[in-house]
Image: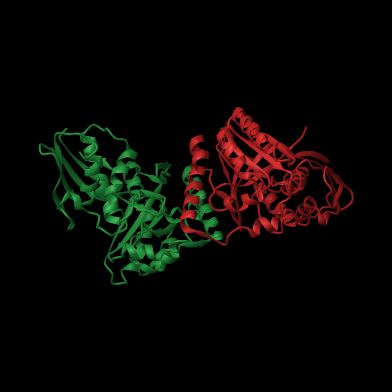
Chain colours: A green, B red
């Protein structure tokens, strides 16, 4: 195999009480990438469609992660990468993560899988760091493993795959506004109340239990975040209205995807997810802010080869 | 049935990263209680052996929880309670909880179970509050349900039963010193670092996942508490030595049981638990402080009828 076409999915990180550790993978939105072996040694981004991103491999997320992997190998050939981006950079649904994992997944396939999934995430972390200025894996892990992932630790990197209830769907709205990562970080408190923290880990443990037992009502009772959401939600117009409408329409829970501006809702069943979509659309149509909205089953497969 | 004899087990609360919400039930140590119907209306403590505790029902933990239940019923008879205490009050392994659940469990059995387990915990909370000056259920829940329990919320009371890996044992040392509850509470910080809190919920979610998947090594990597242990461990002589020796001897993790002074270790297998026991004994024998030490399989049954 000398070339491969892949689908690299969007992902949701910072899932409510699982802030900074829990993420999940989406089905309906993602980038496509083509990766080809080439006689010339090195990593070359040869085409980018969709959004204006640097073509130099050293300045491109997909290039940096591919280079991190490539440098560990002693090959007498290289790889060309074409990127067809659908996930808007800065949308909060893992745009840079999709690029970062796409190149390393594709090259690994072309090489007959010398690296395991955790190692792929390790390489992708280097690319992701270019975009987000810090090393984290909360979008990379679900993109590579699919389903729900818990990044238990970064050093050594340990990723847990949490079971996905069969009928779990997500509704995602991406308001087309820009949130500066620096601002989203600066707004977080350094200190939190012990009682709030206890409530958060109680909810997070319960959420993990609910995912294991497919207990949708428990998932609903656990999808809360009293620590980060009150701060970051201020950066997203009409956040509280969206959340109230989504819950009223049947969402199990609603939260900020990544550091925003996208907002996710988790729902039991496609019908419920569509109802939630309509309710959120109804709110956001009145704001004058452009938005995209998606309904997606939780993607349990993760990144994949196309055709 | 006019009388019943029961075994009311000791329990461990505040299980490391599950501070304030996760507890488990022990097998080898517990109180025995006899409960009899009597023609006289009311709740009567008629005998207490083992430790010097108030015999007046209104001043006794078992009496208060029994009265809380009894008041909801309209019976033309009452109950006499005999308490044979083995769990020393103030030991940190749920002495008052054993008394509080024993009376309500026994009376419920004599009445052919009008109340479910969660309701029994609700009544027992009233008794427990007499001893600990606040309402909590983290020892009551494992005593009633057995195994590991997560108290998801107090109002409404919601208790989750978490699966118990088959080969999980606990080693418990009870150093015979007194820790004042007020002091153990006052030593807790009101505010904690966000980063520490994130690590705690990451570990707690991972622990719940590890219990579901019987992944002993993950349980080991998750049994940490960087929030409460650094403060409360100062109140327990030689705590760090005990912990170091237990981990070195093979314990999956070691922490403070309840608010101390007891220290629990979780172990994979009886042999490992006995090795840990020997290692801890070796440390504590040199301190001059009297202690009891136990090895117990995790009790998945909880409180039970004897003969």
- The picture places residue A62, in percent across and down from the top left corner, at 22, 48
Q: Nearer the viewer, residue B258 or A232?
A: B258
- The picture places residue A73, in percent across and down from the top left corner, at 22, 35
Up the image or down, B248 lies above or below B157; here it is above
Residue A206 visible somewhere in the drawing = yes
Which residue sits at x=25%, y=46%? A65
- Residue B295 located left or right of residue A282: right
Residue that sits furthest to the left in the current view: A39
Q: Which of B240 and B136 is in front in this view?
A: B240
- Residue A87 located left or right of residue B176: left
Question: In which quadrant of the rendered image does the C terminus of chain A lie?
Answer: top left
Which residue sits at x=55%, y=59%? A194
Residue B255 visible somewhere in the drawing = no
Which residue sits at x=42%, y=63%? A188
Question: In which quadrant of the rendered image does the N terminus of chain A lie?
Answer: top left
Total marks placed:
0
- The picture places residue B117, in percent across and down from the top left corner, at 67, 47
- The picture places residue B217, in percent across and down from the top left corner, at 49, 35
Residue that sits furthest to the right in the current view: B40
Q: Which of B54 and A252 is in front in this view?
A: B54
Q: Nearer the viewer, residue A248 or A96?
A: A96
Residue B187 appears in which quarter of the rendering? Answer: bottom right
């Amino acid at each position: 195999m000398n070339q491969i076409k892949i689908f690299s999915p969007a992902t949701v990180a910072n899932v409510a009480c699982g802030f900074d550790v829990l993420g999940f993978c989406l089905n309906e939105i993602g980038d496509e990438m083509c990766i080809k072996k080439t006689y010339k040694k090195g990593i070359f981004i040869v085409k980018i469609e969709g959004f204006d991103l640097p073509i130099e491999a050293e300045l491109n997320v997909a290039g940096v992660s591919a280079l991190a992997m490539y440098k560990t190998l002693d090959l007498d050939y290289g790889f060309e990468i074409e990127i067809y981006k659908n996930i808007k950079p800065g949308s909060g649904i893992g745009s840079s993560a999709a690029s970062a994992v796409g190149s390393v997944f594709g090259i690994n396939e072309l090489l007959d899988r010398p690296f395991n999934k955790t190692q792929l995430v390790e390489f992708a972390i280097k690319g992701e760091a270019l975009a987000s200025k810090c090393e984290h894996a909360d979008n990379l892990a679900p993109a590579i493993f699919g389903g729900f992932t818990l990044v238990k630790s970064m050093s050594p990197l340990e990723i847990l795959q949490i079971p996905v209830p069969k009928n779990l769907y997500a509704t995602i709205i991406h308001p087309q506004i820009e949130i500066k990562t620096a601002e989203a970080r600066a707004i977080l408190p350094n200190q939190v109340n012990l009682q709030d923290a206890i409530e958060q880990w109680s909810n997070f443990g319960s959420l993990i239990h609910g995912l294991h037992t497919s207990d949708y009502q428990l998932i609903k009772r656990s999808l809360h975040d009293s620590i980060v959401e009150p701060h970051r939600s201020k950066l997203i117009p009409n956040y509280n209205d969206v959340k109230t409408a989504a819950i009223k329409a049947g969402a199990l829970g609603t939260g900020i995807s990544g550091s925003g501006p996208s907002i996710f809702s988790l729902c039991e069943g496609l019908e419920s997810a569509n109802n939630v979509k309509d309710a959120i659309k109804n709110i956001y149509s009145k704001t004058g802010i452009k938005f995209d909205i998606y309904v997606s089953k939780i993607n349990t497969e993760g990144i994949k080869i196309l055709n």
